[in-house]
Image: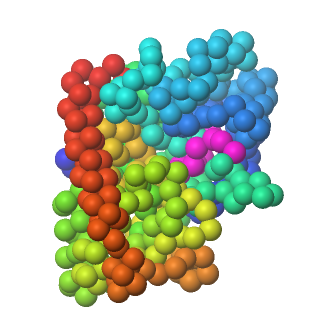
Amino acid sequence: MAKKEFIPGHTVRLVHGGESYFDALLELINESKHLLHLQVYIFELDETGNKVLSALQEAVLRNVNVFLVVDGFGSLSLGSAFKIRMQEMGIAFRFFSEMPFPGIFQAGRRLHHKVCVADKRKVLVGGINIANKYRGNDTDLPWLDFALLVEGKVAAEAHEVCERIFNKKFSLKGIKNESYLIPLETDGVKVRMTRNDWIRRKNEISAAYKSMLGNANDEILLFASYFIPSRRLLKILVRASKRGRKVNIVLGKMSDVPFIKPATQYLYDKLLRNGIRIFEYKEAVLHAKACIVDKQWVSIGSLNLNHLSELLSLEMNLEVLDPPFGAALQKEFHQLIQVHCVEINILDFEKERTMFLRFKSWFSYKGFAAFMRILSLLNRKNPSD
């Protein structure tokens, strides 16, 4: 696969999860004039979801062509009546890989995007779904997550990807630059959009991670939800640490998926003994998927470092190659670690590990990896979506 180049000429802003993200999302929807694509894994009809729907409906009333795609498994609770409601509202809608009935083996190939594109000019990409728990309230903190709001040429590329997914017109070919409507600027931040869709031979995000982590010269800083990396990626992180690179991984002290935490803890001993520092975010669920390498390369989006994201789901990240932006982000992330995280000490960690907890971690880790491989085998042939 040919190396995908960074495109100059963008403005980029980090968007935090919680109210800040939904303010940015609603502003993007409210500013749209012609075309709007919104694709998300989970869309719930709670206060947050209904607020976003109201903004979409107002956009339709302004004669904006609004396209909404949600995942058939992640948004299963919406039901078939939601399609009728969208039709009545004038929103072009479909479920990605709609499920005729709830079945665990149908849960493999999913649309895991969290992306909104307005008028092919602005794009918001991150790991944040549309539901109250991602927004937070006066009593509950939002889940920790990030997104990038980008204005520039890469938005047209994201638009075309969303359009293809909506119309089920997948292609193995790259996006043609001449289809963009925005002229190329030489000034501004360099950005590229990367995707993962292994079944359709797209593995750009995973390849970028392995390349950038493997060639790090100073520091790797990872925020990783559902962290159960492949053996290859684990080796890359260990080798980087052994070569004297600083490797810092921020994980969650708590998880919304019961077996994920013990499965991730199975790796703690290997990571810690190889000089990799582990921090746990203690305030709420960590849902972030972000990486900074050498204060200049940043990747933020929907990809989790596990088999599900690498082998099955459709994922989208935005990557920024810009030393000032990377350095500022790294400083901010280190401050977050200092204030809101606790570092895991290997001696204290081993003291707390009973035989039962060790077995639970081993079983969870091996079970998750095996289950993901089974799902990949069941979903890789003739995907309907």
Give the x, y percent position of residue 20.
71, 57
Q: Is residue 373 left or right of residue 108?
A: left
Q: Nearer the viewer, residue 226 or 58?
A: 226
Residue 151 in percent (x, y) is at: 58, 52
Whether 130 is among the magenta residues is yes
On the picture, is 181 further left or further right than 143?
Answer: left
What span is colored magenta in the figure? Answer: 118-132
Task: Mark yes or no: residue 65 visible.
Answer: yes
Q: Residue at x 57, y 49 (%)?
A: 128
Quadrant for residue 149, please give it.
bottom right
Which residue is rendered at x = 49% and y = 72% of the image? Answer: 280
Position of the C terminus, as image quadrant, is top left
> Which residue is painted at 34% across and 33% down in the image?
108
Question: Would you place residue 208 above or below residue 106 in this image?
Answer: below
The colour scheme applied to this rendered structure is rainbow
In the visual, does 265 lie left or right of 340?
left
The percent position of residue 220, horizontal first and vertical second, equals: 36, 75
Q: Say if the magenta span includes residue 247.
A: no
Judge whether 97 appears above or below 296 on screen.
above
Residue located at (24% from left, 56% from top): 230
